[in-house]
Image (cartoon, rainbow, N blue to C red):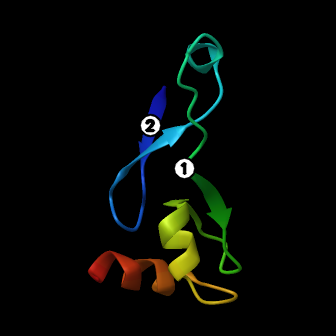
Amino acid sequence: MAKESCDACGDAVPIGGGISGLWSSDPQGTGGMTLELRDGTEHFLCFDCIERLPDDPTEADVLELEAE
């Protein structure tokens, strides 16, 4: 399974799908998603970091998560 780093916390996040997940006896779903924020920036975040964002987040909010 492929992994991508969360832009806020840096954790390796599993990316579901693809042929490797098709034959696995222990399927694992995606642990995050890419968000396009209202300020035009895009960030891949794990679900834990997404939950910590305020409503209508900006890049400054993502950077604040990095500092925590």
* Place of residue 16 in the rendered image (x, y in percent of width and height, measured from the top left): 61, 34
Q: Which mark is residue 59?
A: none
Q: Look at 28% across and 81% down and name the residue there.
A: 67
Q: Which mark is residue 31?
A: 1
- Marks 2 & 1, CB-CB < 8 Å contact: no
Which quadrant is the C terminus positioned in?
bottom left
Q: Look at 44% across and 37% down and name the residue there.
A: 3
Question: Counting other residues with Cα less than 10 Å from the Cα at mark 1, is it few (<14), some (14-19), or many (20 or more)?
Answer: some
Please identify the quarter of the rendering in which residue 17 is found: top right
Label total for image: 2
Tell me the mark number nearer the camera, choosing from 2 and 1. Answer: 1
Q: Nearer the viewer, residue 6 or 42?
A: 6
Amino acid type assigned to the residue bearing label 2 in the image: Lys
The residue sitting at the top extreme is 23
Q: Which mark is residue 3?
A: 2
* Place of residue 13 in the rendered image (x, y in percent of width and height, measured from the top left): 44, 46
Q: Look at 54% across and 49% down and name the residue there.
A: 31
The residue sitting at the left extreme is 67
In this rendering, the answer to whether 26 lies above or below 50 is above
Q: Tell me the element at label 1.
A: loop
Q: Is residue 31 left or right of residue 64?
A: right
Q: Nearer the viewer, residue 55 or 37?
A: 55
In this rendering, the answer to whether 24 lies above or below 68 is above
Q: Earlier in the sequence, mark 2 or mark 1?
A: 2
Amino acid type assigned to the residue bearing label 1 in the image: Gly
Please identify the quarter of the rendering in which residue 63 is found: bottom left
C-alpha distance separating marks 2 and 1: 9 Å
